């Protein structure tokens, strides 16, 4: 086995920007090329949605268990999103990275800010929706949330977009396959320079205006 460590890759996007399916595809393609990669599986106090699998999508835990793990120093970062707690397991990340496995950490902007304030090495990517209308449509189409929750997610999405500029790389999820390809290149090439960053920042400004 090679001694090369895996990378920690932090990815944020407002819910509805399509991040989970993009990351799943990127991880599959990397594994196909024998570049071992995995999702970081967070702990959360939110209830499983239809199709969610415990131990695969999240470790679904009670408030009490979450607090115990927190007190025991098990999380490198935690956040409250939509009134539920989420935490990233330090052991899970260390174990994989030390085995040369890339770990994709899908966290919100609060988590990203917390990691930045710690002594953790990572590369960061933010996935942007192509437009605000598209974002709203995607959130509505998922049909998982009530109208009130949709509004809350939209408000949160705008707040998160305001921080996107802080990330190493921006990816626009306009054409799904392009977004996957771009992310793959960013992960594989450590010195990746994004020559279209200025153009993306302009799109970001438009999204926020
Ligand atoms: P959902 O409940 O829709 O799966 O996730 C809600 C939000 O929580 C998403 O923005 C997701 O990125 C974020 N999230 C999931 N796990 C973690 C975590 O371990 N830490 C942080 N900071 N955010 C997380």
Image (cartoon, rainbow, N blue to C red):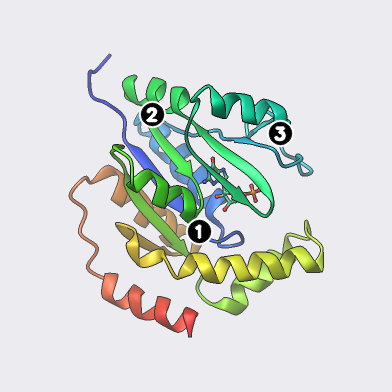
Tell me the CA gap for discs 1 and 2. Answer: 23 Å
Q: Viewer-nearest of labels 2 and 3?
A: 3
For marks 1 and 2, the one nearer the N-term is 1
For marks 3 and 1, the one nearer the N-term is 1
Please tell me the numbered disc located at residue 117.
none
What residue do we see at 67% from left, 55% from top?
Answer: 82
- Please rate how many residues cluster around mark 2, counting C-alpha atoms within 10 Å: few if below 14, some from 14 to 19, many from 20: some
> Residue 14 at what x, y percent from top left?
55, 61
- Please rate how many residues cluster around mark 3, counting C-alpha atoms within 10 Å: few if below 14, some from 14 to 19, many from 20: few
- Please rate how many residues cluster around mark 1, counting C-alpha atoms within 10 Å: few if below 14, some from 14 to 19, many from 20: many
Between residue 101 and residue 118, name the one nearer to us. 118
> Residue 190 at what x, y percent from top left?
21, 45
Q: Circle 3 sits on which residue?
A: 63
> Residue 141 at what x, y percent from top left?
73, 65
Instruction: Tell me whether the residue at label 1 lies in contact with that at label 2, contact meaning CB atoms closer than 8 angstroms.
Output: no
Q: Secondary structure at mark 2?
A: loop
Q: Secondary structure at mark 1?
A: loop
Q: Is residue 129 above or below residue 20?
A: below
Between residue 196 and residue 13, name the one nearer to us. 13
Q: Circle 1 sits on which residue?
A: 13
For marks 2 and 3, the one nearer the N-term is 2
What residue do we see at 34% from left, 75% from top?
Answer: 201
Q: Is mark 1 within 8 Å of ligand 1?
A: yes
What residue do we see at 69% from left, 51% from top?
Answer: 83
Please tell me the numbered disc located at residue 36.
2
Tell me the CA gap for discs 2 and 3. Answer: 33 Å
Q: Viewer-nearest of labels 1 and 2?
A: 1
């Amino acid at each position: 086995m090679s001694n090369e460590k895996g990378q920690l890759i932090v990815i944020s996007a407002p819910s509805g920007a399509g991040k989970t399916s993009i990351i799943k595809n990127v991880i599959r393609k990397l594994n196909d090329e024998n570049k071992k990669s995995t999702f970081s599986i967070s702990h959360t106090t939110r209830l499983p949605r239809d199709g969610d699998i415990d131990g695969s999508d999240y470790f679904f835990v009670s408030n009490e268990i979450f607090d115990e793990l927190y007190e025991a120093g098990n999380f490198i970062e935690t956040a409250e999103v939509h009134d539920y707690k989420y935490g990233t397991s330090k052991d899970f990340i260390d174990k994989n990275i030390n085995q040369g496995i890339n770990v994709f950490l899908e966290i919100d902007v609060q988590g990203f800010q917390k990691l930045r304030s710690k002594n953790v090495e990572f590369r960061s990517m933010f996935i942007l929706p192509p437009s605000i209308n598209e974002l709203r449509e995607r959130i509505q189409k998922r049909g998982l949330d009530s109208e009130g929750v949709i509004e809350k997610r939209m408000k949160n999405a705008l707040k998160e977009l305001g921080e996107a500029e802080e990330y190493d790389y921006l990816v626009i999820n306009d054409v799904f396959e392009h977004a996957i390809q771009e992310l793959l290149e960013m992960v594989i090439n450590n010195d990746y320079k994004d020559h279209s960053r200025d153009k993306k920042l302009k799109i970001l400004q438009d999204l926020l205006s």
